[in-house]
Amino acid sequence: MATMDVVPDGDRLTVTVWGELDLGSRRLLPELYDMLTLSGGGIDLCLDAVGFCDCSGLNTLLDLRSRAVDQGKTVTVRSCGVAVERLLDLTGTRELFADTSRPESAAPPASPDPDPQDKIGQDLRAEVAQLRRAMQTRPTIDLARGILMASFGLSPEAAWSVLVRTSQNTNTKLHDLAHDLVGSVHGSTLPEQVQRQLAAAVAGASRPGDAAAHPVGGPAQDWG
């Protein structure tokens, strides 16, 4: 099962994916579509920790790219592991996700081939570290989204959009924002800028006259 983390990068969003991109990865599309809509220029994908990718996973990426083209944006694969790289090469789709805005740098000088076993060991250690981080941060993100859903009557999709928009507008990593939001429920204080952007994002996710404009059963939530 694949998981994601998002970090704002100027007018773009950098999305890191862990796990496997297969048929089940299509469940990520609604969240990816939301991120694409919220971005100014598009999405950059970091797929180094994707250990398996089949044609269904590739179709998920192609569907995201198609949506981006319709919006006048781009989706690039900034980096990827062996599984994704092999599939992009076999299907001839690598150039569809190339970042054409960056000039190609000269090829680095040739160096002795590294020991394949050392390279495999390094890749595995990096993947394990990234997967552990995903396992630690994802529950916090889900908990923060649940808090927004319960407090403001938001749908799961709207709560996710609020988190992404606030993360982007405050230049805060998504899991850091989620951690601070969960902490605010236990009495800690959110930074003033985060409070303003969070309130604006909630207001943007709530239509006029919608019950989601206020927390369930009470006035506007005090995030301090």
Image (cartoon, rainbow, N blue to C red):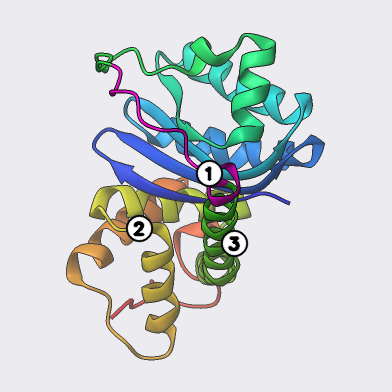
- Label 1 sits on a secondary structure element that is loop
Vertical side of 128 occupied by 33: above or below: above
- Residue 56 vertical placement versus 115 (above, below): above
Question: Which range of residues does the magenta coloring cover?
Answer: 107-119
Cα separation, mark 2 vs mark 1, equals 35 Å
Q: Which residue in the protein does label 3 denote?
A: 128
Tag 1 or tag 3, which sits nearer the N-term?
A: 1
- Asked whether 103 or 198 is in front, the reply is 103
Cα separation between marks 3 and 1: 20 Å
Q: Can the viewer see residue 6?
A: yes
Identify the residue at horizontal 51%, vertical 71% (top origin): 151
Q: Earlier in the sequence, mark 2 or mark 1?
A: 1
Q: Is mark 2 on a helix, strand or loop?
A: loop
Mark 3, Cα crowd under 10 Å, few <14 / some 14-19 / many 20+, is some
Q: Residue at x 53, y 42 (%)?
A: 48
* Kind of residue at disc 1: Asp
Question: Where is the C terminus found, in terms of image quarters?
Answer: bottom left
Relative placement, left or right, of 124 versus 200 is right
Place of residue 99 in the rendered image (x, y in percent of width and height, measured from the top left): 37, 18
Residue 208 visible in the picture: no
Please tell me in which quadrant of the rendered image residue 222 appears: bottom left
Which amino acid lies under the numbered mark 3 shown in the image of this protein?
Answer: Val
Q: Distance between the residues labelled 2 and 3?
A: 21 Å
Q: Is residue 114 magenta?
A: yes
Asked if disc 2 and disc 1 are in contact, CB closer than 8 Å, the reply is no
Where residue 78 sits: x, y (%)? 42, 31
- Specify whether residue 175 is painted magenta: no
Which residue is painted at 42% across and 19% down in the image?
A: 74
What residue did someone put label 2 on?
173
